[in-house]
Image (cartoon, grey):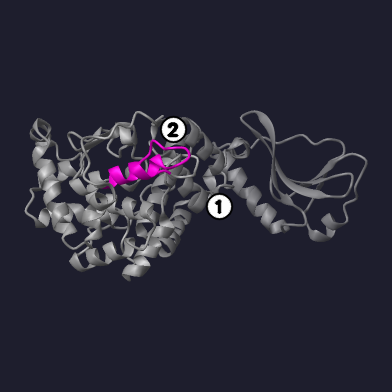
Amino acid sequence: MQALGRTTNDIRVHFRKSVLDNLPSKEKRYDAIDTKVAGLHLMIYPKGSKTYNLVRYIKRKKRRIKIGGYNNITIDQARDKAKKLNAAIDLGGDPYADLQAAKNELTFRELYEIYYNDHVAKYTKRPQDNRAIAEYHILPFMGHWQLSEATKDKMNELHADIAEGSGKPTANKVLNRISSVYNFGINNNKYNGSNPCRGIKRYKEYAKGRFLNRQELKAFFNAILQEEQLFQDYFHMLLLTGARKSNVLAMEYTAVDFDLRRWTIHGLHTKNDDINVVMLPESAIEIIRRRYEANKRLNAPSPYVFPGDGEKGHLCDPKRAWQRIRDRMGVQDITMHDLRRTLGSYMTIKGTSLPMIGKALNHKSLRSTEIYARLSQDPVLEAVNEAVEFMDSDALPSFQSNVTSLFGKPNGPIKFHSFVA
């Protein structure tokens, strides 16, 4: 071990509390050096404060490593820490460099912001979903941590807590988000540690298969009749098309082909990144026509089938209306997405093949049927119409005749160019 020369002000003493308590302050800072543990210094400042340090040469450079304040740790604790640091140095380590790196280490929030701006915002379809999970579940808990503070034990604890409070699927999603941030940091030289989420077993998730049975369908139709017409039409459209709620919310008239009875959703707005073609049964066409007539009466007609007052211009996620419907039905375990599953389920009940259902619902995984399905959409339209007729047999008569009674039978396709921006 290479010794350090003392300055003229430094003194060597056997560290005892009675001795250290009585060390005087001087005009200039000086060190008391322990005679028992090599390199252990107590720095005495002119104003009287005292701090333990280890002073050693590391890789031929004199380094001072702070151990702790005199009033915060005991002499024995300071000696133990000094011995550990000495051992690390003698084994070729550089605790001084490690401490400097830790000071410069990013916090989790800082790395998340880089990850969000450089990856999520650029390459994911719904970056706001990633941000929402981070702001609610992750950043309040560990945003202020330096990256190395996260350990596997802490991540296991967070995983379990979220599973208990918000459910296992959410817990898995949160853990995967944290893991993605660390992987990004490691791969982009923002962090040289390990991923604390690695090796943590995710909870088993079960496939969701909830759909409305015949009795629930009757309750559903009765429940939505008590909503204003806009919400009636929106929820009915979810059921009739099997489309995802975000797509139905943003449905535009110009995307609807009345001659071919299909609705085309651009790949930028679909989950599978492909253009989705949704076949429209007659009941869906009637809703779109009714919405058009209602929209014409607005002061500022909207290009959206379901207009709204918000920034986006269309109806936003109607969670309150959906909760009212569930309350009226007396059923709380259904989601709006279950209406999509309901269409697929009744198509199955009516004997429609799984490949045909996959095409009707725009499932990307059924690649073996893509060539056949692209040759003609007529079988898909027929299958959707059969399922809708079967479901609508339980609906109140008003849902089957309200368009004709209000507006009469339409004569050909509607022209929308007159007001659509």
Crowdedness near tag 1: few (<14), some (14–19) or many (≥20) residues, C-alpha within 10 Å: few
Estimate how packed mark 2 is, as few (under 14), some (14 to 19) or many (20 or more) residues with alpha carbons within 10 Å: some
Q: Is residue 60 above or below residue 32?
A: above
Looking at the image, residue 24 lies above or below residue 118: below
The circle drawn on residue 65 is none
Q: Position of residue 42 (x, y in %)?
A: 78, 47
- Which residues are drawn in magenta? 287-307
Q: Is residue 210 magenta?
A: no
Expressed as whole percent of the image width and height from the top left, the position of residue 153 reads 45, 56
Whole-angstrom CA distance, mark 1 to mark 2, is 21 Å
Residue 303 lies, with reference to residue 342, above or below; the image says: above
Q: Is residue 250 visible?
A: yes
**Residue 156 shown left or right of residue 11 in the figure:** left
Residue type pointed to by label 2:
His
Question: SS of the residue at dot 1?
Answer: helix
Quadrant of the image occupied by residue 303:
top left
Q: Secondary structure at mark 2?
A: helix
**Residue at (45, 39) in percent of width and height:** 313
State which quarter of the image contains the C terminus: top left
Q: Amino acid at mark 1?
A: Pro
Residue where numbered disc 1 is placed: 140
Residue identifier under label 2: 119
Q: Is residue 34 visible to us here?
A: no
In the rendered image, residue 295 lying in the magenta stretch gets the answer: yes
Residue under the point 48% across and 35% down:
115
Instruction: Please tell me which residue lies in front, 387 or 402.
Output: 402
